[in-house]
Image (cartoon, grey):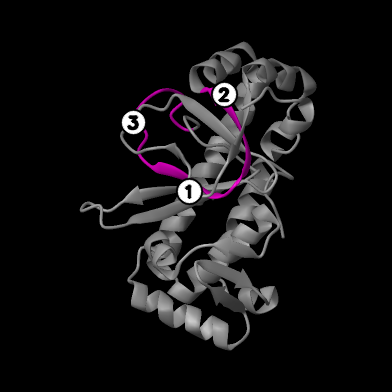
Amino acid sequence: MSAPLLEDLSRNALLATLNEDDRRRLMPHMLVFEMRNGDLLQEAGEEVIHTWFPCGPGMAAFSVATHDHAMAVEVALVGREGAIGGIVSNGHVPAFATAQVRYGGRFLRIKTAALEQLKLDSISLRHWFSRYSDCLLAQVFQTAACNATHTIAQRTAKWLLAAIARTGDCQFEMTQEQLAEMLGVGRTFVTRVVSRLRQDGTIETRRGVIIVRNEEILRRTACTCTATIENHFDTVLHGIYPVA
């Protein structure tokens, strides 16, 4: 944990595009954390007291537990294009979704109450985060549509491509069981998809690791949901969404 520099803020695209006055308003309230894969940023049902900004390759995901808590289905990935915690609610209300680090790295943290006060002090800051709230909700809506209409293979390919775009890496610590839980499907279905992707040379798997070997085949397999979200981001927050 340490105090951030302006260059730390520049590693999060949402913050990097703020005007200098707004970034200097934020800096005294920010702390830098080195987060590891699997670290929790917020838990469903708990009061949201911090807002987090992934920097560089850092990435987190929102997930919602099923009624019997048998699995936690992923509803949105957030990398350097965004933020986690109190963004849509604008306050301390209990978190509906759990947020967990999917790719470790540097994250900036600010108290949500401090961010809300700063948004009241600066109309440009307030408008910028309102735009991001719209983009985050659009991503959640698109994920719901994707889960209802696209195949497991398409959704797996979409997730891997979205992760590569955010992290710049083609290797991810993830078991097939974890991937199945994230997608909200049975492990046997994911095992078939992974086996097929492995056979055609798209991916390689090792114990607890998935490595993408052929992004072109992955793009042909994936649905168009990521492109839809990218287009919406580009309209609302031009230049923010990461593209591989």
N-term-proximal mark, 3 vs 2: 3
Q: Quadrant of the N terminus?
A: top right
- As drawn, is 210 to the left or to the right of 192? right
Residue at the (67%, 46%) spot, across then down = 235
Query: Do we see residue 94 in this rendering?
Result: yes
Residue located beneath label 2 in the image: 110
Give the residue type at disc 2: Ile
Residue at the (37%, 62%) spot, across then down = 181
Query: Do we see residue 151 in this rendering?
Result: no
User: Horizontal and vertical percent for residue 13?
Assistant: 71, 39
- As drawn, is 197 to the left or to the right of 93? right
Residue located beneath label 3 in the image: 46
Of residue 191 and residue 126, the one placed in the foreground of this image is 191
The verdict on residue 91 being magenta is yes
Residue at the (60%, 40%) spot, across then down = 82
Give the residue type at disc 1: Gly
- Quadrant hosting residue 93: top left
